[in-house]
Every structure is written in C-alpha cells, then in structure tokens.
Image: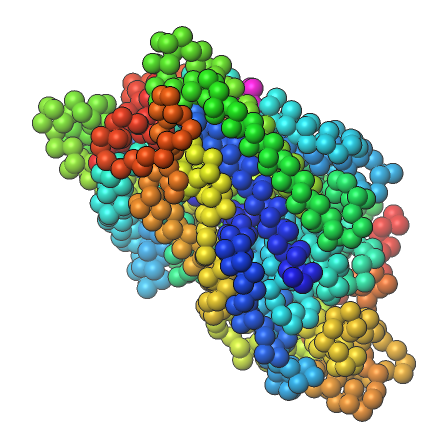
Amino acid sequence: MTTRVRMARLSATAMLVALVAGCGGGGGGTSSNGGGGTLVFGELMPFTGDQAIEGGQVTNGCQPAIAVINKAGGVLGNKVTCQEFDTRGDAVDAVPAAQKMLATTTNLVGVLGPSTAEAPATEPLLQQANMPMFSVAGDPQFDKSTDPYFYRFTPADDLAAKALALEAKNLGYKRVAVVFTAGDSAQANVPSLQAVAPILGLQITDALSITPNQPSYRTEVAKLLANHPDVIINEGDPQSDATFFGQLKEAGGNIPMVITAVATFSDWQNAMSTAMGSAVLADLMTVIDPYTPTEGEGWQVFNDTLKGLHGNGVDYKQYNADIYSRTTYDACIAMALAMTASNSIDPKTYNPHIADILTPGSDKTTVHTYQEGLDALKASKKIYLVGAGGELGLNQYHSVAGAFETQHYDPATKALVHVGVIPNDELKALSLG
Amino acid sequence: MSLILPTIGFSLISASILALAAVGFTLQFGVTNILNLAFAEVMTSSAFVAYWVNSRGISIWIGMLVAGLFGAILSLLINRWLYRPFIRSGTRLFGLIIVSMGLALIIQNGVLAITGPGFFTYDQPHGLAFDVAGIRFTYTELAILLIAVVAMAAVHLLLTRTRLGKAMRACSADSALARCSGVPTARVVDIAWLLSGALAGIAGVTLFMNTTAFSVTTSGDFLVVIIAAAILGGVGDAYGAMLGALIIGFATEFSALFLNSAYKTAIAFVILVVVLLIRPQGVRAAFAAAREVQT
Amino acid sequence: MSNATQFYVTTLLIYGAVSIIACWGLDLQFGDTGILNFAFIMFQAAGAYTAAVLTLGPSTQSNPLSNYQHYVFGASVPYPVSVFAAALVGALLSYPIGVVALRRLRSDYQAVAMLVVSLIATTVVISDTGLLDGERGLFLIPKPLRDSADTLLGYQWLYVGISCVFLAVVLWVIARISRAPLGRSLRAIRESESAAAALGKNVLSLRMGAFVVGNMIAAISGALLVQYIGSWSPNGWLYPETFVYLGAIIIGGAANKLGVLIGALLLPVGISEGVRYLPSFGGPGFVDAVQFMLIGVLIIAFMWFRPRGLVPERRRTFGNPRWSFRRRTPGAGVATAMPSADEQGLAG
C-alpha cells in the first residue's frame, strides 16, 4: 500500500497531546529549530508523496542560496538556514504544517512555497502572518493575486499550455495528439490546449488522459496511432511516460513529441532514454520550459555553488537546469538583500523592498550576486537584482510575465541544449484570438 | 475494428503480470487467511534487490531469480517473526490487517530511505519485436508471458500432482480437518508463504520491467488491483486468481480501447463489485467459506 | 501564548476534534458492530464536498468564488444547514453501498468491496473534472459564521467552540446508541450474527443502521474539516487514510469511547515531535521516510503490547453495566468468554 496518508492530520493531534501534557511547557524545546541568531527560510512544500520532487526543486534553490549568503557574512550579521515543512502535497496536511512552521520557528523570515495543491489553503494563513511567500502555483486564481506577500516567479499554467501548442505549430505540424496523466496535469493543460488549437489551425486527434502508473499502455498507444497524429504534446511522471513512450516506440510509432518542463529532470530523461533509446529521444523530442538564460554572473554563481554542494540532499544533475530551483535561489537572495536594504529582519518591514529590488530603474545599479548587492547597498545605491533566473520582470501582481524556451536533448552530454526562445508577447497575442 | 486483436494480446500481457502477483497473494491468503497488505512491499523490496543485482552488470533474468528467492525468504521471515507470534498471542483477522499495514509502512519507507525518491530503470533488453498472429510483442513482453505461463503451470502441477499440493489445498479448504487428518499444517503454512513470496518477487520484477521506469511506490499502486483479481476468482483458489487476473487484464485494456483510459482501473473495480453482487463468493465459489487465521 | 502559537494550538484542537469524531463514527461500525468499512474516508470526503459545494454558491462566471473551478450542485445555504446536508448525503450514499456490501458478502470480501468503491470514487472525481474540480479540488470555501468574530484569531477560537459542540453532539448520539438496547443488539451481532438472528434480531437492518449512522458521522467530520481549511481535493482522502483511522481505534481500544478518543489523538504520538529534533540528514524526504517507518513500528508495538487497545472495551455485566472497573486479565479464558470483534470477524 502507499503511504500517502494525511499524517499531519494525526501527528498534529499528537502535538496537541504533547502540548496539553506539557502544561504550558510546550514551547520549551522548539528554539533548537532556528534560535541563536539564525534566520530561517521555511520550505513549505511537499517532501513526500507523489509531488515530493517539488520539495526537491525548492531545496536545491535554497541550499545554494544560503551557502552564498552565509559565505558573504549572512544577513545583517545573522546566519541563514533552510528548513523543510512537509505539506505532503495536500491541503489537509499543509494547514497544520504551515501553522506549525509559523508557531514554532523562531526567526522565520520568509516562505519558499506553497505548492499548487496547498496554495489556496495556506496562502491566507501566510498573508495573515505577514510572511512573504514565493509560490510555484501556476493556477489561474493566482494570476492576479492582490496579496502583497505573494510572489510567483514562474509563468502561469495557461501560458505554458499555449507555448506547447505554438511550438507544435511552429514545427509545422497539423495533427496533434494530447497525452497527459489524469489529474492535475491534464486538468491544467488539456482545456487550454483545446481552446488554443483552433486558433493556431491545429487539429487535435486524441486528447488522452491516462491513468498514471499502469503496467501497460499498449492499448492506448494503439488507439493513438490509429488516428495518425503528426506530433504528441505530453506531460507525465517519469514512470508513466517511460512506459507509454517505450511502448509507443515498440509499436513502431516514431512520432515527434513536444514535452513540458518535466523533461528537464534527469530522472525523466534517464527513464525516457532507457525506454526509447537516447538517440531516438534526441531525435523526436522538443522541450518547452519557462525560459531563464543559462548565462550571466548570477546564473554562474548559482550553478557553481549547486555543483559544489552536490550530495546530501542536493542533486546538481537533476536540478541545475530547473527553473524552480533557480527562481527559489533568486527569492532567497532577494529576501536577504531586502532585509539588508531595510535594515530589518521583520517581514512586514522588508517585504516592500523585495518587489523594489526586482524592478529595473534608471537610477538603479544592476547586481547579479548577493555580494554585489551588499556592496552596492553599502555604497547607498539602489539596486536591481538580476540573479540566476535572469530578469524576472514582475508585474503588479508579483507574477512574472514568462517567456519560454525550446530545447533539445543531447544524448552525449545527457542534458538539454537551448534552441530558441518563445517570447511572451507571442503568447499574449494568442489569448486575444 | 482492427484494434481488437492487438488489444487481446495486450490484455494477455497485463493479465500475466497480474496473475503472477494474484496467485502469490491468494496461495498465502487461502492457507493462512491473513489479508497481507504488505504483499506489494514484498514485491517492491524484491524487485529492488533485482535492481541491485542488475546494476552490478548481471543479467536481469538472474536478478529475477534472486528477487524470487529474496521474496520467498522475506515472506517466510515475516510470517515466522511477525504474523505467527501475533496469531499465537491471540490477534485475529482485523488486528492482523493493522499489523500488516504497519509492516507495509516499515518496508516501503525502509526501501525509500535506502534508494531515495527517484525513478529507476533495469538494464534490460529492448527492441526485438516479434509478430505473433498479427500482434506485435516485444521480447520482454513475450518473456513475461512465458514466465507467467510456466509459473501457472508449475503451480497447477504442484497443487494437483504432489502430496504437498494436496496438503495445501486441504489446508485451504479446512485447516482443522487437515490437521486432524495428519497434515503438518505449520509446514504447509511456511511453504505457502515461501511460494507466495517467490511469486511476489518475480511479479515485482516483471511489473518493473514492463513499466520500464519504477519507483518505491510502483507496486503499491498495484496492490488493490492484485487483491481485486484474487477476490474476483474467489480467495484461496489459485485457478480463480488466474481467472480473475485474466478478467481484469481484459477489462482494463478493453476499457482503454472503447472508453476513457482514465477509468481503466475503475472499470476493473466496477466489474469486481458487479461480480460480487451476482456471485458473492467470487467466480469460482468452491473455497469461499469463512475461516479463521492459520499459523 | 503568542498569536502564532494560538493559531497553531487552535488548529490542533480543531483537527483533534475532527479526528475524534471520525474515529467514533468508524468505531460504531467497527468496534460495536464488527463492520470493516474500508470506504470510510470516502464518506468523510462526501460530507466535505457537500458542505463545500453548498456554500460556494452556483458554479457560474458571475460568482467570484467559483471563477476558476467547476462543480455541480452549487448553492449558498446558511451555516448549520450545510453540515446537516453533509450528514444527509453521507446517509444517502450509505444505502446503495450498504445494501450491496453488507447483505451477502463474507466480511473480508465486504472490506475489499468497500476499498474498491473508495478507489472508484477517487478515480471518478479525479477524471471527471467538471464534477468536483478534479484533482485540483475545491477551494475558497467560505468559513461559516466568519462575521461573528472580529479577528481571524478570534474566529479560530470560535471554530474550536463549534468543533466542541459537534464533538459533544456526536458523543451524545454514540453514547445513547451504545447504552440503549440497540447497542446490545449491535454487540450481539458482532459476537455472533447467527445467534443474534436466532434471537429474532434483524441482523441486516441493524448492521445497516450502524453503517448509516457511522457514515453520517464521517460526513459531519468532513464538513467540519473542510469549512475550516477552506479547500478539499482527492489527495486529502486517498484510501490509506481509512487504515490510519482504523489503526487509531485499535490502538486506543475498539468499542471503548474513551479509548478511541485517546487513539484518535495518539496514533503517532511523540514521533512528529521527535523527528523535529532529529538533525536533517540524508536526501530530501529521508527524515520523513524514517518517520513513517517509526509509525509502522509503533503500530506493531501497540498491537503486540496492548492488543486490546490502551483502554480496552469494558466488560458489560448484568446489573452493573456502567461501573465495572474490574480489570480483565488477558488470556484464553477471557478471550473465549469475550471474543472481540476481530476474533470472529469472519463469522457468518
């Protein structure tokens, strides 16, 4: 059986017993989490269950960030650290996890998360506590969030779906098969794809939402092939995709694929290149993921630091190309600089400085790293941070506009290579029809 | 429709994997009456043992044998060290379900702590498709089909042609009567666990081979389907489990063909419910009388 | 207490109340009547979804709450009505399932059949996204009586009060059933269906009654929970959740209200506290994996050392039904005199 249970629901009650039994002494031992002048970035993300990879993405952004910050002497003389708060990818567990984080973490200065599934339930709690949060929830209800503490450094789901369809068209295909695993993934993408396909003159031959983690998809594959698509647009977990496309290949279907950002994971790449053969994969696949340039000083420092930390929870291979890791890293650097700029570790005070640091201005000095930022602030300059994720370009809702890039797989290096960029305005134009 | 013939072939593959697991599950359940929720975790841990062997450059087929061996020993030890003491101290059916749930948590997360949450692949032969009666099978699929057929035949021979098999069937039908007739029930129970574990190990490897990429939760997701196949045929009846696996294999693949693929397993479960409505004892009713747990 | 601590403590109190209510509901079926309801969590979910859609308002573009979500039966009913409606849905859903499962199947088949029903429900909700907004789930579910408190913290305490009211009502109902002749009939069925039937008890309708009432309580717990957290999705009610509740009951002591209460609060006691003091080591999620292993060990340890639960079921003796504190020693003699639910689970 799977262990995906709402343990927090019950472990929370265990805490209650401990608190009651402790008769007011409940808060006694909690200082070990963050006391002693160490500031905490709380990672409110799933670390177990199906979405555990999202926790990994955030950890692999936070860890290099604190390494860089602490190396430069910390924030206002305080060391910083990352702490995991497992939401298990589910609102019922996320609420007590968030409350536990807020109540028991001394010197909590900001939150990395929440993720898609928990955001609706936990965002109000964090706002209430005046805690800046850097969410990865691409859901449309956060596109125009008016919460001043809410930030989103990754593009909206809706935009991502449009980028997939646009790329299929740009590659010259007409007949598109859409294959998503049933659940979140299909729900976020299929309706948008179906809406945008006619605008682009694409014909959807099949819109399959497949049950994930099945031993076989032979029948689905046969059905899909019978409709003769030119291209498949897909997002799935490594296992389901490897099974599906492995069997597609065995069935003789060499069909080009346009894949979402899942293809940036080395887990996914390894699974798929085993299933299809890496040469075939390289031949057929185009990857569309949110674009952040892999160049510039900010990126270089992130990349080198992540590489240096590899091992013990940090996985360079898996996360170096990951936009969530990079933007999480930027979020930490931005928070640290905002605290320095406002000379306060109180989130309420420093929060307005975050957006300021991430907005360009003619009177501002562009900085790429934490050290550069510190130096500029020491010289009483106003700063604009262009970090590992490049120019983020926040709008008034603290969301990024979001461009996408196309990438191909290089079997020799087992990594993705940048091919081109799909600019944001092209995608925006699509919504006008 | 031209897809019907191929779909029959795919159904057979799905049924093969399921049959290995379901027969393993039902052999043990039939003899001991313990609803072992940790069965899928025996599959997982054995298949990861095969991964460990395989990642040392040894053929996956050898890995499968090792997995079968590991599964058999693990199952035996689980019974000797966990279930048997509990039964002797008076824990009964419902309590044992909870114990097996605890065990499942321990094994699954133990494997998770060792392997980490990622996805893994075997180094297994790819390509090599064969056309059998117009259906395109891969080498792996044919091998899985063959393994299932051989294993089912072996179980059949064991149950019908050996004294041990007779004793197992006797225990399955009425343990107290079997004991009175001089059947060494404790030994039969041990052997049931061994066999069940061996089949679990082999089923785990075939499942992971067929999905290509696998993780710690891969077979956990499969557990209820296994139980459904076993119940569908009538618990404790190896032939019933084979039949149940076939029915579910066909149901899942044909529902993917004619209906929505998202409802694949749901359809199989609906069939189970409907069958239980019509035949409350399962398709083959011979062994469906209620019994007490056995050590 | 600081505000943050108060928020945390109130959350724990509310979750504790939900957990206790749910476990009492399940115990009425499992402990008192001997029904192994593996679909229990589905009834909690049914209650939660009912309360959610009945307060979110109609699913139209003009409704700001439902702008980004799709669901059926949207309405805006006043507060306690949404909870009663949840209970009603729990009851209505129980009938078809109960008729199928309770009537003809042996008890382990019953359990599996219900497990399967729970999985079918999950699949349908995830796959048919127009029904209850799929895997993303419902959100922005309004908090009942929010205007009655000035601050959010005040509201937290108000909701603790509301939870306690529900807790008290459910306890009253359960205790009534347990003490009434009805309770004795249920236990008689648990001990021996055929004997109860021979005494003229209508076994099926009595079992059905316990099944329905237990599921209504489950639905109430779901409504209580969802109106507090404000969002609900299939990840919150996957089938293993039922096992957790069942584990809590067995650890606490089946068919003993106090025991079940303790079990509902205690299942992973100390563990979630303990791991917070563990240094973070290994990969992401390693500590969590260890935590789950420890929970598994704990469950098995409890089963071994306290097989009848921390607070075992009281022995009910004639003439002195409520004050029997005589400790029963575990052993074969008692076991035969007082076979527990699990000892005869397969009977009939």
Q: Quadrant of residue A415?
A: bottom right
Vertical position of residue C133 compared to residue C296: above or below: above
Q: Give coordinates of residue A423: x percent, y percent.
A: 80, 63
Looking at the picture, the colour scheme in use is rainbow
Q: Which residues are magenta?
A: C94-98
Magenta-span inclusion, residue A405? no
Viewer-side residue, A167 vs B186: B186
Report the residue at 19% width, 39% height from top.
B191
Question: Where in the figure is residue A5, as x and y percent of width and height?
Answer: 51, 46
Residue at position x 12%, y 33% in the image:
B184
Q: Residue furthest left?
A: B182
Please tell me which residue lies in front, C221 or A144.
C221
**Residue C73 rendering spot, x and y as whole percentages:** 74, 29
Quadrant containing the N terminus of chain C is bottom right
Tell which of B100 and B244 is nearer to you.
Answer: B100
Say if A376 sits above or below A149 in the image: below
